Image (tube, rainbow, N blue to C red):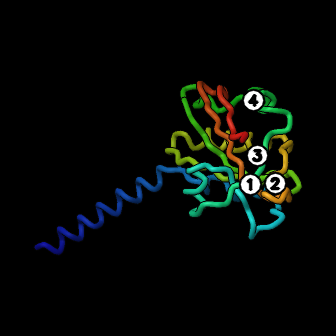
Amino acid sequence: MKTPILFFAFIFVSFLIKAQQDSIITTSISKEKIDTIKPFQACNKDQVYAIDFYLLTEKLGKELKQPKEIPVFISGTPKLREYFENHPLQDPRAKKMVLRVNVAFLVNCEGKIGDFILLNDFVDMEAEVVKEVMDITTKMPQKWTIAKDRKKNNVDCYQVVSLTIFNGVFTSVYYKKD
């Protein structure tokens, strides 16, 4: 008698776990799509640096060294904010949402950006909106300074942009500057 009950309990728990996994979007949301949008090469895959950001460390599964000088947007934060403000979200569902989206990207030793990583997890109802945010983010201007190590050599470095969306509009754009 215990065997059928345990079997059905196992099936039920497995179903719940699968349903929960299906309702979350992770970094794989459009990794293939993003990579095809912007072909990208790190200069030295074995020696990548990163800003100190806990979600990035969590997603990468390891902590990377911090550079002496981190990548910053050449035209300044107000111009980066202006870029996002000029690209409002078109999905009508976004007008009913408040979201915080953190996106990591690699600034290579030539100042090019790519290898975008969505750092947050989202539920299904937010998925299409987040895809649109990622699309806008991957097309942001390629105007980032090059990170430097302690010897002043150009290095590849992950930077993170944190975006707040309120009623379909980017209300806050932030990245670490020092």
Read off the residue under disc 1: 67
Q: Is residue 34 visible?
A: no
Q: Residue at x 60, y 30 (%)?
A: 94
Mark 4 vs 2, N-terminal side: 4
**Where does residue 160 sit, x and y in percent of width and height?**
68, 46
Q: CA distance from mark 3 to mark 2?
A: 23 Å
Mark 3 vs 2, N-terminal side: 3
Identify the image quadrant of the C terminus: top right
- The tally of labels here is 4
Mark 1 vs 4, N-terminal side: 1
Identify the image quadrant of the N terminus: bottom left
Read off the residue under disc 3: 138
Of marks 3 and 1, the one in the foreground: 1
Label 4: element kind: helix
Q: Residue at x 60, y 40 (%)?
A: 101
Estimate how packed mark 1 is, as few (under 14), some (14 to 19) or many (20 or more) residues with alpha carbons within 10 Å.
Answer: many
